[in-house]
Amino acid sequence: MKRGGDLSVAALAAIVALPLALLIAALLRCTTGGPILERQTRTGRHGREFQLLRFRTGPDGRLGALLRRTGLDELPRLWNVVRGEMGVIGPRPDHPDRVLRYSCRERARLTVRPGLTGWAQLHAHPHPHSDGRPHSRGRPRPRGSAELDLWYVEHRSLRLDLRILGLTVLALLRPEALRLRPAGEQPS
């Protein structure tokens, strides 16, 4: 059932976002001249590695900064959902080097598909795209995000997924709304 929901949400989002994604791709091609997409190796469900897709934004440029700040650089990840490598909701996909250092308890994160959004992304820091490229390029994950991911894995349900999806939509429409709960505070 979750996979069907993931495909439905990804298909709807892809249809809505396709014109914007095509515009972004054309702008990137014109302004950077290089490849439009970049691939990053990440670890998914059951420890399987996959290539996480994102628009190539580069370290400089106003377009890249705008894409990172708004999270639009992550639109190609919808393809990862369609391919079954990710879900819409779940822990953030981690780099294989970090996964090698997981404790036995942290390995529980590998029992579910990583997600486009999740409990930790919403609650570990003020905004999922506040520093441009969260959790990537060797930066440490925010304190508490591993615990929040584990909390999600232990408590996942359709109701919680719908809540996360609703909070994500709210955060996209009103970023200041993410300050709903201090980091690490779990629902009752």
Image (cartoon, rainbow, N blue to C red):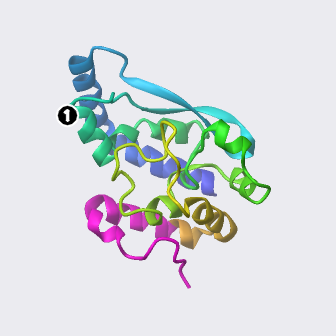
The part of the image, by quadrant, that contains residue 36 is top left
Would residue 108 appear left or right of 22 to someone viewing this image? right
Q: Residue furthest top?
A: 33
Query: Residue 93, relative to residue 34: is it above or below?
Result: below
Query: Residue 70, relative to residue 185: is it above or below?
Result: above
Would residue 86 appear left or right of 26 to someone viewing this image? right
Would residue 85 appear left or right of 140 to someone viewing this image? right
Label 1 packing within 10 angstroms: few (<14), some (14-19), many (20+): few
* Residue sitting at x 31%, y 70%: 177
Q: Residue furthest bottom?
A: 188
Q: Nearer the viewer, residue 14 or 185?
A: 185
Q: Position of residue 158 (x, y in %)?
A: 59, 68
* Residue sitting at x 37%, y 76%: 180
Image quadrant containing the N terminus: bottom right
* Residue sitting at x 35%, y 72%: 179
Query: Residue 74, relative to residue 173: is it above or below?
Result: above
Q: Position of residue 154 (x, y in %)?
A: 69, 68
Give the structural element (helix, strand or loop) at label 1: helix
Tell whether position 167 is magenta.
yes
Tell whether position 24 is magenta.
no
Q: Amino acid at mark 1?
A: Arg
* Residue sitting at x 40%, y 48%: 12
Image quadrant containing the C terminus: bottom right
Q: Position of residue 27 (x, y in %)?
A: 22, 25
The residue wearing badge 1 is 62
Span of residues in magenta: 162-188
